[in-house]
Image (tube, helix red, strand yellow):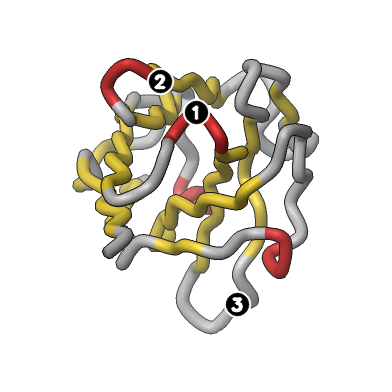
Amino acid sequence: QVQVVESGGGLVQAGGSLRLSCTASGLTFDDYAMGWFRQAAGKEREGVSCISRDGVKYYPSFVKGRFTISRDNAKNTLFLQMNSLKPEDSAIYYCAAGLSRWWLGLQENKYTYWGQGTQVTVSS
């Protein structure tokens, strides 16, 4: 049984930092491309970052330079370091896994397994 569990969310002031973690079990982690997505209240879910199993990364413009995705295949864990946070970064953040040798991008339908999400709130 595959489980994907996010942690590390919380309340932070604008300009602050948070580090999210995502642990996956029940799968061979280093066979999977991974992604971070977020959904703010009343908005569509959007992709935040993704990383291939070999470490190729992608960031959309609205987080580039502020967020860093990384993975530790030995620990089946994905990370998202978020710096210079803004109130508009407030959302539930989700981790997702997709079986692929290559980079998957930020299309949600490419990812098979999803976590329950962790809340990030940035106060102004």
The spot of residue 66 in percent (x, y) is 57, 22
**Residue to which mark 3 is pinned:** 43
Q: Position of residue 88 (x, y in %)?
A: 53, 53
Label 1 and label 2: CA atoms lie apart by: 6 Å
Q: Give the mark toward the camera: 1 or 3.
A: 1
Residue name at image x 50 percent, y 28 percent? 30
Q: Position of residue 118 (x, y in %)?
A: 28, 56
Q: Nearer the viewer, mark 2 or mark 3?
A: 2
Figure quadrant of residue 72: top left
Type of amino acid at the residue the image marks with label 2: Asn
Asked if 96 appears above or below 60 in the picture, the reply is below
Residue type, mark 3 in image? Lys
The dot on residue 5 is none
What mark, if any, has residue 73 been given in the picture?
2
Q: Which residue is mark 1?
A: 30
- Residue nearest the observer in this picture, 117 or 110: 110
